[in-house]
Image (cartoon, rainbow, N blue to C red):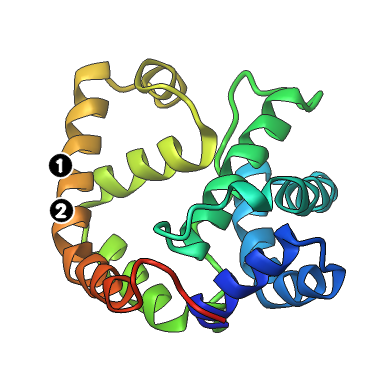
Amino acid sequence: MEQETQAALIKKIAGGDPSAMVGLYDGTSRLLFGLVLRVVGNSTLAEETLLDIYTHIWRQSASYDPSVLPLQWLTTIARARAIASLHWSKQDRRRRKLPAGNPNTETTVAPEQQKIARASFESLVPAQREILDWAYYSGLSSSEIAAQIGKPVGAIRTHARLGLGKLIDLFRPIFERATQAQSATGGHIEA
């Protein structure tokens, strides 16, 4: 599903169109479910969280800022709600392990970006990948990550900073193209 289509659906959802919600769900739920499942590590909790995410989208769609890419807005909501679900669940998190990093290789809602993201992430050194996985999927602070994996806090912060810096450099052309495309449409993506 194209970003323009997603933005148009979010705009229609803000107007109360339930068929737009069905369209957005059909076009994005696999991607968001995969993200949520990776965070919570339990399919039942992931399904419950996905329902919560789309309820939140329905209620908050009027607050969507068209200058933000729709997929970025959706994944930000999904990640935040998944981390909240994880923290509120009754699971024992004393020594939590992240699920294996073997994401579904099927095409998702953004196949080009997915391919670039995976290749970029794989280009990081293993320590950077591990730390960024922990930070993104667990929502833990650097000191909490250090305690979980038994590494010094300074090393955690250094690996995170270096890994993020490299990813920013690799993704800069993609963000510039998206910004140019939005500028060409006057900052709004039309239906």
Q: As drawn, is 75 to the left or to the right of 15?
A: left
Q: Which mark is residue 162?
A: 1
Residue at screen point 68% across, 42% down: 40
Q: Position of residue 166 (x, y in %)?
A: 15, 53
> Where, quadrant-wise, is the C terminus in this rendering?
bottom right
Residue shown at 19% from the left, 36% from the top: 161
Secondary element at image label 2: helix
3D distance between C-alphas at marks 2 and 1: 6 Å
Q: Amino acid at mark 1?
A: Leu
Query: Would you name the residue on which mark 2 appears?
Result: 166
Q: Is residue 138 left or right of residue 40?
A: left
Tell me whether the residue at label 2 lies in contact with that at label 1, contact meaning CB atoms closer than 8 angstroms.
yes
State the image coordinates of residue 132 (x, y, percent, origin top left): 35, 43
Residue 55 appears at what percent x and percent y?
A: 80, 49
Q: Give the quarter of the figure containing the N terminus.
A: bottom right
Q: What secondary structure is marked by label 1? A: helix
Residue 140 vs residue 186: left or right?
right
Callout 1: 10 Å neighbours few (<14), some, many (20+)?
some
Front residue of 63/98: it is 63
Marker disc for residue 77: none
Q: 77 or 121, which is in the foreground?
A: 77
Amino acid type, residue under disc 2 in the picture: Lys
- Counting from the top left corner in percent of width and height, residue 101 is at 49, 57
Q: How many marks?
A: 2
